[in-house]
Image (cartoon, rainbow, N blue to C red):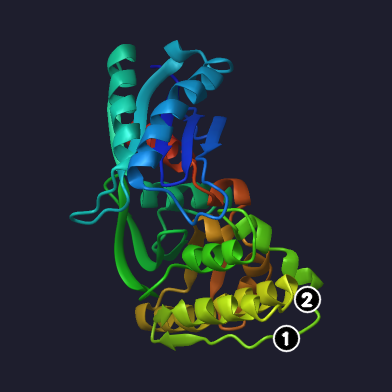
Amino acid sequence: MKPYTLGIDTSCYTTSIAVVDHKGNLVCDKRQMLNVKKGARGLRQSEGFFQHVMNLPTLLEQVSESVNMNDIGCIAVSTRPRNQENSYMPVFNAGERFAKTLALGLKVPMFTTTHQDGHIMASAHGCRFNHNEEHISVHLSGGTSELLKSKWSEGQFDVQIIGGSLDVSAGQLIDRVGVALGLEFPSGKHLDGLWKGSTKKLKFPVSVKGSYFNLSGAESYGLKYGESNESIEDISKGLFEALLKTLEKALITACEETGINSVLMAGGVSASKFLSSRLPDVLNKQGISVKFCPPQFAADNAIGVALLGALNRGESNEN
């Protein structure tokens, strides 16, 4: 049997192709960020689709330089944001169409999954987390901030939304404030780390009810502080501290209500050094175990998609 599974993910801001072997080892990981004009806070779906169509052949050519395409035994692709009815975004059509063409050309089966499942699996793989264990997944990204009761079932994650943002996502909060402060989009990697130079404590609102929360208040304060010429370092620290306190309160409630004390962080915002260096210690005092993966597995990628494809082929002995 051919040893490799190739995964494809075409999210709102990154084109990704990854290859894993039959043991779940990462063989190749190629990505291309989509181009966003300076000062803009995102892309139209049509523009994202076009850029994916242009990027995919180039990334596949890069993959073929280190992987024999004749050794690809399965194509896996994310075709929608999450495992929910009516979950749809046009950008995923680019990856699906490319995957179908590639599978037909190579005469191999194609497996479909979701962007969210890919994030959860990539994070679990990156921190050696047992994906078969029932847990709470926290998906923090540009479009999503959800607390999910997650259970592995029949080749995918059976998830139930038990908390999360009721307005803007954590990624939108960071990006909107970051762009207003003159940083490039997406702003997370630029804004995170600036807090180390903070010398002043700024007040940011924290709004949590049960395991659900609102982040628009923190966004308003961040924009207001920017207009007031507060330092970007102080704004960064205040913003991430507000997000930290928000997640702390929401997760304590979610764990109490579900009886689950194992938490897996996933999505691009979970790559934050501020959150990963502080949230585990804070929640460990409450008897809650929190796992963060390395940034490579947190940002948008096709690693989790490829791993899901390999698992559904019945060949991966990852755990």
- Residue type indicated by callout 2: Ser
Left or right: 127, with 233 as reference point = left
Quarter where residue 196 is shown:
bottom right
- Residue type indicated by callout 1: Lys
Label 2 with label 1: CB-CB less than 8 Å: yes
For label 1, count other residues whose C-alpha is less than 10 Å away and answer few (under 14), some (14-19) or many (20+).
few
Residue 108 in view, yes or no: yes
Residue 308 in view, yes or no: no
Quadrant location of the N terminus? top left
Q: Residue 207, image x and y in percent? A: 46, 87
Residue at the spot 54% in from the left edge and 49% down from the top edge: 299
C-alpha gap between disc 2 and disc 1: 8 Å
Q: Which residue is mark 2?
A: 198
Left or right: 116, with 39 as reference point = left
In terms of depth relative to the viewer, which is nearer, 174 or 164? 174
Q: Which residue is mark 1?
A: 201
Q: Is residue 282 above or below residue 129?
A: below
Residue at the spot 51% in from the left edge and 76% down from the top edge: 219
Q: Is residue 307 above or below residue 228?
A: above
Point out the residue furthest to the left here: 85
Q: Residue 263, image x and y in percent? A: 49, 67
Badge 2 element: loop
Left or right: 15, with 128 as reference point = left
Quarter where residue 269 is shown:
bottom right
Residue at the spot 41% in from the left edge and 38% down from the top edge: 9
Q: Residue 159, image x and y in percent? A: 31, 61
In terms of depth relative to the viewer, which is nearer, 113 or 158? 113
Q: Residue 124, image x and y in percent? A: 50, 52
